[in-house]
């Protein structure tokens, strides 16, 4: 019998308390974030329960989080040093290493759908900047004015941290999803506004295949979060894949070893990953990683605050 279809999501890794806004009440923000994670899980679960593909499930979950200003993706994205929003996203379909990504895009309401359009088009894997925006327009995707993306929380965060440094982005809040569908296929998606105070034009690990996002049916689907420069230096998601493929490592051990390589590269963070069998794993080296998972026919598990996953019925 095939293992059940399953979906895991993350809402970024960072120090605990994770708040990018110290004037805010952590408790009420965590409650809003827990509700947001549950809504994203429900959206993805609806796809999987109806027999839909892992790819559609991860896109359904991530688009919900991109519209929710609590997260560093889509509306509510972190601001560059110039006070602008530039977003990165990627999608990976484990059936035949189909990959698509967009980097440093502005105005695209759902960067992850632009990544999907790049993947479906198939000529390229990664498009950046104005070219990626023109491509998304051509694909008929929704656009919003720059001010729609910029929230007061992110303005205050930029005032506190005008220049990105090597420490994890306060608040993290990048979003991602991995899934396995009833047919055993795997998919991953990640979407982010990058890091507060980043130099305009900076691209992180999230849209880069084999760094922040990866899916291959034979091994695993991975979505990472944390200090992108260190995940790029560690070739993080490729490292997880390689340990499964070449060493026959267990998924959790492979992710932890790859996170150790990230630490050695000078950063921290976490990931969610799923393989062809078993439950998702979600290790992290920061104080907190917002996360949740659900299996078709099972309860929902969410952690929006420091501490273990909580069951939501
Ligand atoms: N990894 C993302 C980046 O560096 C940020 C994050 O995960 O919080 O762009």
Image (tube, helix red, strand yellow):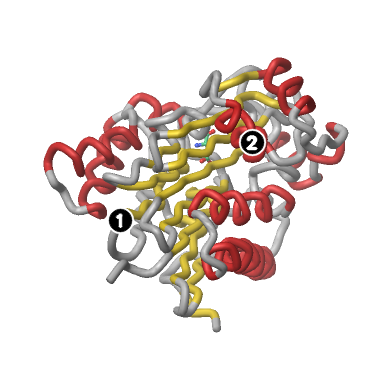
Image spot of residue 195 (x, y percent): 59, 33
Q: Is residue 18 left or right of residue 200?
A: left
* Quadrant in the picture for the N terminus: bottom left
- In the picture, residue 45 is in which quadrant? bottom right
Q: Which disc number belongs to residue 163?
A: none
Evaluate whether residue 83 shows in this view.
Answer: yes
Residue that appears at 65% across and 24% down: 104
Evaluate whether residue 171 shows in this view.
Answer: no
Q: Which residue is mark 1?
A: 276
Q: Which residue is mark 2?
A: 193
Q: Is residue 184 left or right of residue 105?
A: left
Say if 50 sits above or below 171 in the image: below
Label 2 crowd bin: few (<14), some (14–19), many (20+), radius 10 Å: many
Cβ of mark 2 under 8 A from ligand 1: yes
Q: Is residue 311 left or right of residue 70?
A: left
Residue that appears at 66% across and 53% down: 65
Image spot of residue 48 (x, y percent): 52, 64
Label 1 crowd bin: few (<14), some (14–19), many (20+), radius 10 Å: many
């Amino acid at each position: 019998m095939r293992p059940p279809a399953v979906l895991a999501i993350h809402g970024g890794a960072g120090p605990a308390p994770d708040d990018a806004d110290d004037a805010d009440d952590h408790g009420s923000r965590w409650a809003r974030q827990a509700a947001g994670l549950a809504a994203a899980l429900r959206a993805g679960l609806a796809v999987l329960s109806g027999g839909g593909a892992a790819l559609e499930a991860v896109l359904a979950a991530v688009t919900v989080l991109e519209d929710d200003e609590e997260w560093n993706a889509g509306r509510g994205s972190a601001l560059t040093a110039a006070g602008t929003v530039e977003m990165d996203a990627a999608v990976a379909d484990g059936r035949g290493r189909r990959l698509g990504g967009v980097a440093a895009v502005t105005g695209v309401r759902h960067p992850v759908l632009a990544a999907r359009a790049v993947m479906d088009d198939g000529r390229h894997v990664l498009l950046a900047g104005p070219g990626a925006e023109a491509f998304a327009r051509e694909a008929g995707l929704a656009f919003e004015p720059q001010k729609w993306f910029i929230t007061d929380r992110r303005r205050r965060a930029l005032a506190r941290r005008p220049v990105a440094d090597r420490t994890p982005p306060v608040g993290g809040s990048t979003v991602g999803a991995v899934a396995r569908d009833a047919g055993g296929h795997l998919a991953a998606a990640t979407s982010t506004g990058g890091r507060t105070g980043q130099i305009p034009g900076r691209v992180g690990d999230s849209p880069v295949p084999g760094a922040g996002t990866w899916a291959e049916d034979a091994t695993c689907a991975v979505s990472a979060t944390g200090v992108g420069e260190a995940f790029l230096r560690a070739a993080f998601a490729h490292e997880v894949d390689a340990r499964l493929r070449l060493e026959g490592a267990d998924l959790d051990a492979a992710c932890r070893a790859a996170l150790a390589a990230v630490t050695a590269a000078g950063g921290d963070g976490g990931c969610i990953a799923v393989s062809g069998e078993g439950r998702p794993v979600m290790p992290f080296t920061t104080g907190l990683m917002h996360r949740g998972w659900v299996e078709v026919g099972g309860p929902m598990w969410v952690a929006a605050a420091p501490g273990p996953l909580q069951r939501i019925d």
